[in-house]
Amino acid sequence: MNVLVVGGAGYIGSHCVRQLVAAGHRPVVLDNFVYGHRAAVAPGVPVHEANLGDEVAVGRVLQEERIDVVMHFAAYCYVGESVTDPLKYYFNNTVAPLHLLRAMLAAGVRKFVFSSTCATFGIPATLPIHETLPQAPINPYGQTKLDLENTLKALAHANGLSFAAFRYFNAAGASEDGSIGEDHDPETHLIPVAIDVAMGRRPHLELYGTDYPTPDGTCLRDYVHVDDLSRAHIAVFDRLAVPGTQLFYNLGTGKPTSNREVIRAVEKATGRPVKIVDKPRRAGDPPALYADSSKAQRELSWKVKFPDIDSIVATAWKWHSSHPRGYADRPGR
């Protein structure tokens, strides 16, 4: 199929583009390059520079490229920033996609794959987190994602839009060949930050919360490889054929990993120590978050290729060790 990947030059989007090519589809990238990198896009893939909220530009791409399905990865995703600057998140994560969706409907494109988040669940009452748990976001980032999920439900009823919303957990890792990986500015994710410390690019890692009711006192999270996420997004295509289809899936390994375990995995992969500075808990950080992904496994035949933190960190280290300055080490950044 012809697949428009909105945010296809970003971290998850660029990995999904390569998985689409590998699966025999034809991806087309739409990105405004606020956070994306041109060098992350697979060679030969058409690239259109535009904002997802530009209905005219998006409509033109949909028509010219004969798009069959749209995949949306263009959200802002810094939780802390969403608290301090909520309007930025509501305009980009909720308002702008409305224009994208209107352009789709006008062009007759009615298949949509949405990158949602486990943040829509807030602090869960039970673990692991399954799709039917109540959704109660505790920050604007999670709320904007839930708002768009609800919009998609309404469009499914009113306009026959078929969609899948993937609520995934901690996306991590890099492509197996080390050609693309994680390069954010600022970088806040634990694995790349720990690798930066191991490489001497940061003096230390600040570990927030060491007194949680967990085996080693640090938070437990569910790390899922970015390529495993991408494969699930592609596997859902065949289930979107019936107009008005509404699908929701949690994506994670189901294996909780503590912050200290992540740091040890980085030390193992790099062969270097990671200096830690203990800090108090951050407000709103639950002790544990991990997924029940049995629905995706059952309905999509989804299987993770990278089931543990060591295998995920190994791919991240391959990328960072060969690109210590991220995409600045590659032409076409």
Image (cartoon, rainbow, N blue to C red):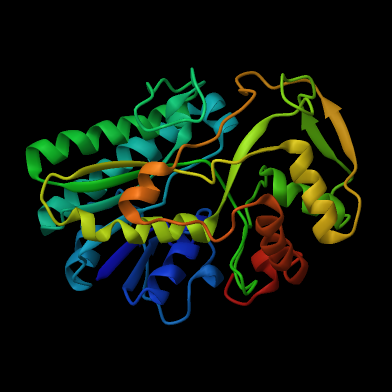
Residue 237 location (% of width, % of height): 26, 59
Question: Residue at position x 23%, y 72% from top?
Answer: 65
Q: Position of residue 165 (x, y in %)?
A: 33, 43
Quarter of the image for residue 4 reads bottom left
Residue 232 at x, y percent in the picture: 40, 56
In the image, residue 74 above or below residue 169: below
The N terminus lies in quadrant: bottom left
Task: Tell me what residue is drawn at x 30 percent, y 35 percent.
Answer: 149
Q: Residue at x 72, y 67 (%)?
A: 318
Q: Residue furthest bottom?
A: 44
Q: Position of residue 316 (x, y in %)?
A: 68, 60
Q: Residue at x 52, y 41 (%)?
A: 169
Q: Quadrant of residue 206?
A: top right
On the question of residue 50 being in view, the answer is: no
In the image shown, does 249 or 319 lie closer to the viewer?
Answer: 249
Relative placement, left or right, of 270 versus 30 is: right
